[in-house]
Image (cartoon, rainbow, N blue to C red):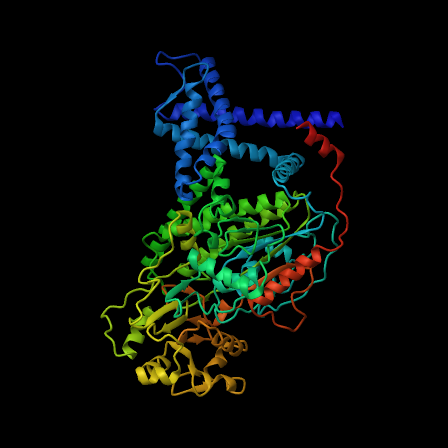
Amino acid sequence: MRGVAWRRIASQIGRSVAVWAVSTLTMLLLALVLPDFRLQSADGDSATRIALTAACGAGAFGILSAVVWPLLVRLLLLVPALVLGLLVFFLNGSLLLVALRFNPSARGAAAPETAVIVAAVMSAVASATGGALAVRDDEAYRRRLHRLATRRRRRRTDPPCPVTPGLVFLQLDGVGHDVLKEAVGAGLMPTVGRWLAADDAARPAAGRAPTAGRVPAPRAVPGRPLVGGPGPTHRLTPWHTDWSSQTGASQLGILHGSTFDVPAFRWYEKDRGEVMVCNRPTSAAELQRRAVAHTGDGGLLTEDGASRGNLFSGGAGEQALVLSIAARRRGRENRSRAGYFAYFSDPANAVRTALSFTAEVVREIAESTRARLRKQRPRVSRGGLYPLVRAFATVVERDVVVAAVMGDMLAGRTAVYADLVAYDEVAHHSGPHSRDAEKVLKRLDRSLALLERVADHAPRPYRIVVLSDHGQSPGETFRSRYGLTLADLVRAGCGLHVPRRAERTHSGTEARAAVRAALHRPVEEKDEHRRPARHSEPVVLASGNLGLVSFPDVRHRMTKEEIDARHPALLTTLANHPGIGFLLVASAEHDGVVLGPHGTEIPLARLDRDPGPLARFGPGAVGAVRRTHAFPHTADIMVNSAYDPADGEVLAFEEQIGSHGGLGGAQSRPFLLSPVDLSAPVPDGERLTGAEQVHHVLRRWLGELSGPEVPLTAVPDEDAEDERAA
């Protein structure tokens, strides 16, 4: 055993020497290329002296990066996260200058701006070399991850890591059930395809529509996570959202078990005189508080859980990049941006992410220019800061969240829930079936493959569950098709002045909110006053293809009779517009009614017999509309856009060509991808409906995994010996 331990120590020393040698060579090459970076005196030195200077400089830089860098990052916890990302390069360059300054040969020198470049290149090369050497030796890679997990567990005050399996929930924001099946069938997501290897739902045959299927459970291997086996390891199940098909409602329901009184992504509350926006930190915190009060439960992640990149915490003790805590006073227990600092504590991570970020910005500018030159339709504006927002969502947020989940798995946490918003952000502006969106799906699949590999080295087995919170429905914007916004149409129906030129309706997305949270700036949206005046004009808000009209000077929810008395033409104008599918309003006579074109007026109690304009929206539309009608903060007028079942298109009231938020098409059909050794989400033939039901399914799985399990394979004695030797 002792000989094995010494051989492993020697292997580790060999890899360190190899990284040092590559770093030295990199420094020599950079000294030849960059004029302001030299490794010799002004009079010149021998090749041996120059090589010695490079070797000493590379060694000193490596030691400073390993020892001093994490301390510098901790001292910068008050700096906005994205600003830290930029400071990484300058601080890294400063470490190189220090290494050269105290070089025993006293020969190295570099201009400050050149030091930044040299340090960045050396960090990237050293990281790539070390990773490549470790990956080539699977045993070494496994031991490295095992030691990292052990160190993480030693930092925690929790009991030893349980032997029962943990659950990792990965939310692919905005990826619909049909989009996932198409991506797997086209080979865009090979990892998911392998998990569904024998599932007919993932392998549609030519000439027929894919159908959902069940697959037999493979034999579980003791001590190993059930992912990526020789046969199908996962089942794909569609589920159906409520009327409000958006992240705020769905994720609140999934994590906290309640979607009660969340009528849309944004809505006006008359009793508080405030506009609620799901991706505003103060609103998210209030919604989470209400959900906990409504259910009497802290959330899905209360037992040794971690929440990463979400709108809500789920009751997790470990939280990072969680919007609902971003508005609180900063403290050790609520650092919403802590994940950024943990990630950037490795300068190589910062260099790699910065390069990918820059490449993504260039890619977006090129793709948007190509779409504009081709006069692609439908199309929305993708200028301004959008390329930076897209790059943040598809690169920075993805890298940081995935790294945080890896850390949680290596620490042996019981339940981890993480949200990856990349696809949702790109699909809003490029379309859910665009080439841009397909590229994002490929990268998300690679992230799943990485986490699958980490699961193999975690201190406990893991089950990986992948799900989405909603889908996206394609279609032209309401403004683009008709030349006016929903607010303009409401003003016309009220007899108010309508501007000659329709202004774009601001599109608020999860990624934009995450950027603001990273910068430690509040989320406030243009023309969206948090406290409109009591006697102001109607408040018109948009949530994808769902619109909400409220009259702030009337303290209660107005009835149809009251609206007709005040604005006789308003409801008729809205209901008969070709871009609107149906309206929901309260009624003194019928409690609530659904209004459609040509004078259609159907009481809610009669919708089962005569769904009227709701018929084209599917079998779940009636129940969703009734449930929303019962919410205390439902708007005076709920407006759902028109929907064409032939092509699945809706008309967004925001500037989005891939939208969600209301009824109509793929936006209401997300997916749940679960291991087959867990119980089926619902019995065959039944629909999985609503985020609250998904919450109960996930809770059931946590309960199943906490019961008696096949004992884990014991950690080999040589591993324990290696730990003691290290």
The image shows residue 632, relative to residue 392, as above or below, that is: below
Q: Nearest the camera: 648 or 639?
A: 639
Count of all numbered marks drawn on residues in the image:
0
The quarter of the rendered structure image containing the C terminus is top right
Q: Is residue 85 above or below residue 472?
A: above
Quarter holding residue 143: top right
* 516 vs 557, nearest the viewer: 557
Residue 81 image position (x, y, % from top left): 42, 43
Q: Compared to 150, does 701 lie above or below?
A: below
Q: Residue placed at 48% from the left, 62% from the top?
A: 287
Q: Residue 244's spot in the image, x, y percent?
A: 48, 69
Q: Residue at x 37, y 47 (%)?
A: 362
Q: Is residue 182 shown to the viewer in this render? A: no
- Please provide percent x and percent y for residue 214: 68, 65
Tell whether 111 sits left or right of 260. Answer: left
Rendered location of residue 25, percent (x, y)? 48, 24
Instruction: Please report the residue visible at 40 percent of the width from the left and 43 percent of the height from the top.
Output: 80
Residue 225 at least partly seen: yes
In this rendering, the answer to whether 710 lies above or below 127 is below
**Image quadrant in which you'd find residue 657:** bottom left
Left or right: 284 as drawn, with respect to 450? left
Quadrant in the picture for the N terminus: top right
